[in-house]
Image (cartoon, rainbow, N blue to C red):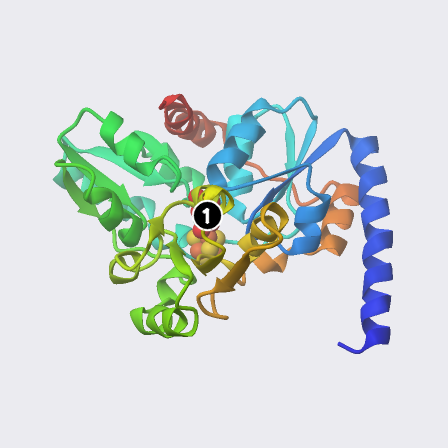
Amino acid sequence: MEALALERKAEQNRELKERIAKLKKERNAIILAHYYQRDEIQEVADFRGDSFLLAQKAAQTDAEVIVFCGVHFMGESAKILAPNKTVIIPDERAGCPMADMVNVEGLKALKKRHPNAAVVTYINSSAEIKAETDICCTSANAVKVIQSVEADEIIWVPDKNLGDYVSKYTDKKMIIWEGYCNTHDMLTVKDVMEMKAQHPNAQFVVHPECRPEVVKLGDFVGSTTAIIKYCKESDCQEFIVGTEDGTGYQLRLDSPNKQFHFATKFLVCPNMKVNNLKKVAKCLETMQPQIYVPPQVAEKARLSLERMLQVK
Ligand code: 13P
Ligand code: SF4
């Protein structure tokens, strides 16, 4: 961008941030932003986090309104956990393709075939799927959740890559759904090897939503928060990052003198980037779109989320 266009953009952002701060006070709202959101959204957020931390925060907040900057299932989980709050999102079209890869009919059929299995569902799923679930998990607690389940057989939906990773930590029989994250699954062994050759002193940190053969190359494997924590605390000064590019905001904030190379320029979730500051201001102004979950679905789904929050 030219210098003039950049200056104009910065001025627009300043104005939008002021408007958002004012509206937030008027509405008694809290802005929650996932680490994959655009930098300028993470800047105005009251709280940044991964799926687990944001769900926890939504369940605990005193604010009357939650502005959820992430993708649809995250706003839905917030509404399920905090039914008396108004949950608004900047853009209804911000969905998660992985969440859409599993449907209720398919899951019910699988449950029928494996009546003794417990259903463990990644939080990246719809409210209807959560309502058919025994316990939810996120990438931050997936192993602990699996280990907390009593049944010897587990139906795991929808992420096959995270399912493969978790299966290494349990002897239970896992029936794994064939879903995946279009963004993380894009990263190949070749991409990582090329980056390693370019940055021989860097450690490779990777999210378990990546393919198993890519995860195998990791010096560290963990959820977005775990990756951020590891990079902050490590003595290493240079990292190749195998997760979504928005994570760079928190990584650079925590460790301004370390170097972070994203494993490919394609590690950008287009759904997460649908939101922008203008839409955040607009949803606070209009209080639309609001998340609605039918009460009979929400009630059942809440149990599976609350069970997850209780796992220590
Ligand atoms: P976490 O927030 O659990 O790291 O999951 C990553 C993700 O893809 C969220 O959509
Ligand atoms: Fe869904 Fe992947 Fe985007 Fe997360 S990064 S919202 S799992 S598509």
| Residue placed most toward the observer, 63 or 86 | 63
Look at mark 1 in the image and give the residue it sits on. 235
Residue that lies at the very extreme toward the bottom in this rendered image: 2
Q: Residue at x 72, y 48 (%)?
A: 280
Q: Is residue 42 left or right of residue 232?
A: right
**Quadrant in the picture for the C terminus:** top left
Question: Which quadrant of the figure has residue 49?
Answer: top right
**Quadrant in the picture for the N terminus:** bottom right
User: Which element is circle 1 on?
Assistant: loop
Where is residue 211? Give x, y as percent: 29, 60
Is any part of residue 8 visible from this angle?
Answer: yes
| Residue placed most toward the observer, 56 or 216 | 216
Q: Is residue 42 left or right of residue 125?
A: right
Q: Is residue 266 left or right of residue 164?
A: right
Mark 1, Cα crowd under 10 Å, few <14 / some 14-19 / many 20+, is: few
The amino acid pointed to by label 1 is: Asp
| Residue placed most toward the observer, 159 or 239 | 239
Decide: is 7 above or below 76: below
Q: Residue at x 61, y 23 (%)?
A: 84
Q: Residue at x 23, y 29 (%)?
A: 147
